[in-house]
Amino acid sequence: MVRIELEGVQKAFGEAVALECVSLTVEDGEFFTLVGPSGCGKTTTLRTIAGLSDPTAGTVRFDGEDVSDVPVEDRNVGVVFQSYALFPHMTVAENIRYGLRFSEPPRDLSADERVQELLELVDLAGMGDRDPDELSGGQQQRVALARALAPAPDVLLLDEPMSALDARLREQLRREIKRIQQELGVTTVYVTHDQEEALAVSDRLAVMADGAVEQVGTPVEVYEGPATEFVASFVGENNLFSGTVESREAGVLSVAVDADDPTGTFRVAADADTDADDIAAGERVTFCVRPNHLDPDANANRFPVAVETVEYLGGTTRLYGGWADREIVLRLPEPPGEEAVTVGFAPEDATLL
């Protein structure tokens, strides 16, 4: 397995810039996810790692070796695309064996032995003689994964491999992909626009927007400590507040939020990671609070929310409401049963952006 490094990678298609100076590192054996909205550059980044797209500028390294000019067939990567791209005139076993067309099976196995090994790995044992159209969508995607793994690649690249599947099957298959990745220890880069999927499967993830990396971190780091307003609004639900710092005391900022409301001054804990030591009275700041941190029983930072929409989600209830001409999203164990609810949050549950 290998360590992947991208340094200052840029990609332009004529005047259209797809990637702007992307620099990131994927560690040996890591499950790393590129997540972001459509058109943000995540697939272009994946194709650049694969060798399917040449960077306009910058460097791609595998274990410290520059592979920017190495063709895809010489990079020892396995790629699973959004479309399964299975050959309908071949059986399942023949489709998997096709993955060995450029290399020999690992560990001195025969091609047939490798195919049987992979069928067992992806839980398709006994289905090698079937045609692809006899399989479900999830089974077809497993065949595509087995084909990509056939030559024992150093790097596995997956480009939105489950976007065509229904929600329940997506959850099942993502657990299978994670299990297989951990069992093999293969360095994996996964592309998705689904934030929940990215949080669920990743060791670390990179949130991308407009061809650039906004933040890299573990799922907990990105969700609990978004670095930018875009990350805060894209990864999970969030409530954003902007205002002016009135005072600072013992590492806590008193922020007057832009609102014609007497409850609009909130105490926000200053996190050293956000250069909060440089924030003084009179400066403008933006902070966010996750819906699950807005609590009717909180003692601090209380404000009223006029409930507009209630969505029962089984384990929790999501409420959309209004306060001071802005939308507020709440997550509560039970519906409030009232048209208004007063909530608050602890200063440490707010994240400065």
Image: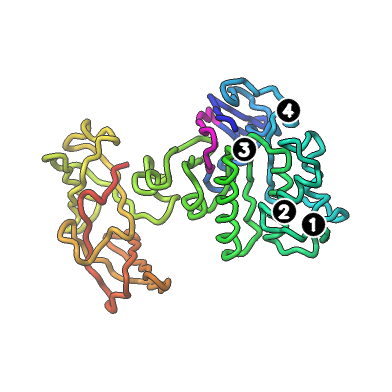
Give the Cα separation between the discs numbered 4 and 1.
Answer: 28 Å
Q: Which residue is at 69% across, 43% downward?
A: 149
Task: Name which residue lies at 60% across and 49% down.
Answer: 180
Separation of disc 4 and disc 2 at Cα?
25 Å
Element at label 2? helix
In the structure shown, which secondary structural element does the residue marked by tag 3 occupy?
helix
* Residue at the (53%, 27%) spot, across then down: 21
Identify the residue position indicated by label 3 in the image.
46
Q: Secondary structure at mark 1?
A: loop
Give yes or no for residue 210 being in the magenta stretch.
no
Mark positioned earlier in the residue sequence (2 or 3): 3
Mark 4 highlights which residue? 74
The kind of residue tagged 3 is Leu
Label at residue 128: 1
Residue at the location (72% across, 36% down)? 106
The reply to whether dot 4 and dot 1 touch (C-beta < 8 Å) is no
Residue 105, picture quadrant: top right
The percent coordinates of residue 277 (x first, y second) are 21, 32
Task: Identify which amino acid the numbered label 1 is placed on.
Answer: Gly
- Magenta residues (range): 20-34
Q: Position of residue 23 (x, y in %)?
A: 51, 29
Earlier-in-chain disc, 1 versus 2: 2
The answer to whether residue 56 is above or below residue 271 is: above
Q: Secondary structure at mark 4?
A: helix
Q: Which residue is mark 2?
A: 119
Across and down, in percent, residue 11 comes to: 62, 30
